Image (cartoon, grey):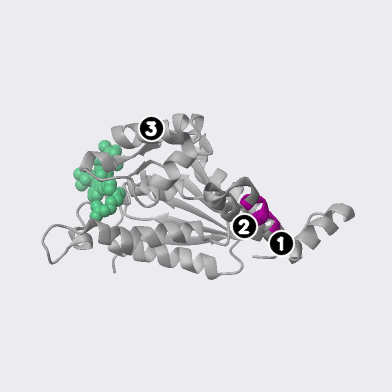
């Protein structure tokens, strides 16, 4: 039997999803996409899971599209239909990550290139090994950033840096990625996975429904006026204010005890 392309492990309330095609730096094939989406769907549906860590096996995180998987973009017309690949595989993946009901942490253990970089950057919090690099590899093969890259990059680092990274395709070391705000933090290689799991464990003990709503609200404001953002905040707070976690958080505060959050 062949190795799974995605490994799944659970530690307490944390689900760890590991891309597992190390020989080709965990680049995306159709089969790996299917397994990854399945693993994320399962984590989303599994109530005891309250945070997810995604990482890569071997020396890379993910080198983007597997450029050998010709079947992915094959079309009757002859030239590959790359748009169809985006619609069929990368759009669902980016939207799946953005709609997760729990926080998602990327533990970028090595190179993250092309759609592999976009996948990591679409996660809620990105930790990277100091030896890792981020590469907007698309320009080198005549494409634009995808898997949400055009949306994410300028929001994370501003237009000037987004364009320079995307046009040059230069390797950006993890420390520099932290300095410019592309990622949350670069950590020592040996500490990466433990730090990511510890952070996920901390978030898992928090009111995760509110954390997922925080992501949704912050992403939504990119197209809202201040007045509309205030309306949206009122709408979301109204709902969260009626949920168990708010009552529990306030009760725990006054009782000077640790809260036990359960909403999702
Ligand atoms: O249909 C579509 O294409 C649409 C979808 C687009 C989304 C995208 O992601 S487009 C961008 C695709 N990705 C790339 O262009 C990145 C290509 N890879 C690289 O530029 C470099 O490999 C890296 C900068 C990521 C890492 O460089 P390095 O020197 O650390 O490693 P390496 O020696 O280049 O790669 C190691 C092995 O992985 C090597 O195989 P080998 O020689 O040991 O058998 C290499 O061929 C393989 N590999 C790396 N990236 C890919 C890959 N194999 C297939 N596809 C890859 N993307």
Please tell me whether residue 98 is drawn above or below residue 157 in the rendered image. below
Left/right of residue 251 with respect to residue 261 in the rendered view: right
Q: Is residue 240 visible?
A: yes
Report how far apart the C-alphas of labels 1 and 3 lie in the structure. 39 Å
Q: Is residue 38 magenta?
A: no
Residue that badge 3 annotates: 172
Q: Is mark 1 within 8 Å of ligand 1?
A: no
CB under 8 Å between discs 2 and 1? yes
Q: Mark 1 sits on what residue?
A: 240
Residue 66 visible in the shown view: no
According to the picture, the residue beneath numbered tag 2 turns out to be 213
Question: Where is 37 relative to 233, above or below?
Answer: below
2 or 3: tag closer to the N-terminus: 3
The percent position of residue 76, horizontal first and vertical second, equals 13, 67
* Element carrying mark 3: strand
50, 90: nearer the viewer = 90
């Amino acid at each position: 039997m062949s190795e799974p392309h995605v490994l799944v492990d659970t530690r307490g309330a944390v689900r760890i999803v590991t891309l597992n095609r190390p020989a080709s730096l965990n680049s995306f094939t159709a089969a790996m996409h299917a397994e990854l989406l399945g693993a994320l769907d399962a984590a989303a549906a599994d109530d005891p899971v309250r945070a997810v860590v995604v990482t890569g096996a071997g020396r890379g995180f993910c080198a983007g599209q597997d450029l050998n998987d010709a079947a992915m973009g094959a079309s009757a017309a002859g030239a590959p239909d790359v748009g169809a690949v985006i619609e069929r595989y990368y759009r669902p993946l980016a939207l799946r990550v953005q709609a997760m009901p729990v926080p998602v942490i990327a533990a970028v253990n090595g190179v993250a290139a092309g759609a592999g970089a976009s996948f990591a950057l679409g996660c809620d919090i990105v930790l990277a090994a100091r030896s890792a690099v981020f590469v907007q590899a698309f320009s080198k093969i005549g494409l634009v950033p995808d898997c949400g890259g055009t949306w994410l990059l300028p929001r994370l680092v501003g237009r000037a840096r987004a364009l320079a990274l995307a046009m040059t395709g230069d390797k950006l070391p993890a420390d520099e990625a932290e300095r410019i705000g592309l990622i949350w933090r670069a950590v020592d290689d040996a500490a990466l996975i433990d730090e990511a799991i510890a952070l996920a464990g901390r978030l898992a003990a928090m009111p995760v429904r509110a954390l997922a709503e925080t992501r949704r609200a912050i992403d939504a404001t990119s197209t809202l006026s201040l007045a509309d953002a205030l309306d949206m905040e009122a709408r979301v707070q109204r709902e969260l204010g009626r949920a168990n976690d708010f009552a529990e958080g306030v009760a725990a505060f006054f009782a000077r005890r640790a809260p036990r959050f359960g909403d999702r």
